[in-house]
Image (spheres, grey):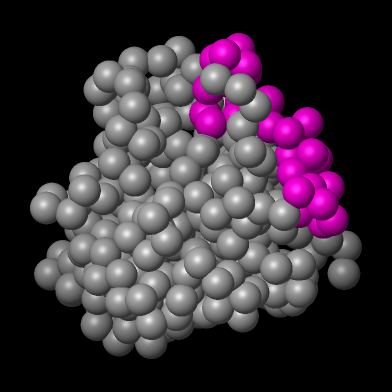
Amino acid sequence: MHMADALISPAIGGTVWAASAGLIAYCSKKVRDDVDNIKIPLMGVVGAFIFAAQMINFTIPGTGSSGHLGGGMILTILLGPYAAFLTMASVLTVQALFFADGGLLALGCNIFNLGFFPCFIAYPFIYKNIAGEQPTQQRILAGAMAASIVGLQIGAFGVVLETLFSGISELPFSTFVLLMQPIHLAIGIVEGLVTAAVVTFVWKARPEILEMAATAKPMGHFSLKNVIAGLLLFTAITGGALSWFASANPDGLEWAMFHVSGKEEIEAPEKGLHSMLGALQEKTAFLPDYSFKESEQKEGPAKSGEGESAAEPGKGGKGKWPAVSAGTSVSGLVGGALVFVLAAFIGFALKKRSGTR
């Protein structure tokens, strides 16, 4: 559900950028009160796992579409809403800057759609009410399912509204929304199952993590070795090898766009802010499309900020499956490492500022 720059007008992009920046500032202030030596590495490790997991698209049977994990609920349940929002912003920033996954103009929209709704709507109003103060495995499953579905539904509706307010005439509201919501309902069900599995793993290993995230208190002093080792192993396997098996079908957003407009991509304006940010992204993305640049040159230059239509391996039904590629493996491992460093750095910087107040 990473939006391309072509789907957003400068006015809407700038407005939602400002909203996301304000949320980042607010979350940074809140995180300073509860960040500690336990939460800092957890932000990095869980963020790296979400980056790797987002590389894997799963087929939605009977639709010709695919979906991937959003990850907002996993982050929020394990980190709390404020640290989760900052970590999601780190994931999406790394994807946009270094892998050309999602546009730079649309980055604020992507952060808002994939971060705000799960962190500040689905988690407090749905998951916490279902899971309760003393969650069980059944409550975790029910809460994760309901919250993931609702969070993704609102996020998908946000995409529709942002394209509407941007004046994208190729995507009329009524038709677009009738396709976006059902396909993301199916994706949300899978996301709920994956979220429940990951959260249950952490809950069984260290239930204190869920309690501290829910109460927004410092995590205190206890060992995270098993949790961190498990998540790092999942991240390495997912980004380094399982990413080869990503579905070749278009994702939910591309699928909906194709059935509305007859094409999976909307052309961005060749001048103005779109062009400037596109040129910048071409320079910063050293592994565009999650592959080495040499392969990109053979096929012609990629259109920057195309979002998932250009930036995820195995898209468009082209090439053989599984798409065994060193470039994809390197992208998964390098991207995960970059997210780990960025998210952990944010946590460390906020902890340092908290100590100097």
**For residue 57, which quarter of the picture?**
top left
Q: Residue at x 38, y 87 (%)?
A: 125
Residue 103 horizontal/vertical position (percent): 65, 51
Quarter containing the C terminus: bottom right
| Res 147 quadrant in image | bottom left
**Image check: 90 left or right of 198?**
right
Q: Is residue 130 visible?
A: yes
Say which residue appears at 30% left-offset and 77% top-offset. Answer: 178
- Is 295 one of the magenta-colored residues? yes
Residue ID at (61%, 22%): 300
**Residue 31 visible, this angle:** no
Q: Position of residue 142 (x, y in %)?
A: 18, 73
Q: Quadrant of the N terminus?
A: bottom left
Front-lying residue, 124 or 305: 305
Viewer-nearest residue: 195 or 33: 195
Q: Is residue 267 above or below residue 295?
A: below
Quarter of image, res 228: top left
How many numbered marks, from 0 up? Answer: 0
> Residue 115, position in %: x, y?
53, 67
Magenta segment, prevailing SS (helix, strand or loop): helix
Q: Position of residue 184 (x, y in %)?
A: 30, 65
Q: Quick check: 69 left or right of 137?
A: right
Q: Is residue 249 above or below residue 19?
A: above
Q: Residue at x 74, y 44 (%)?
A: 278
Residue 227 highlighted magenta (yes or no): no
Q: Is residue 122 above or below residue 308?
A: below
Residues in magenta, as a range: 270-298
* Camera-side residue of 88 and 318: 318
Name the residue at the right extreme. 356
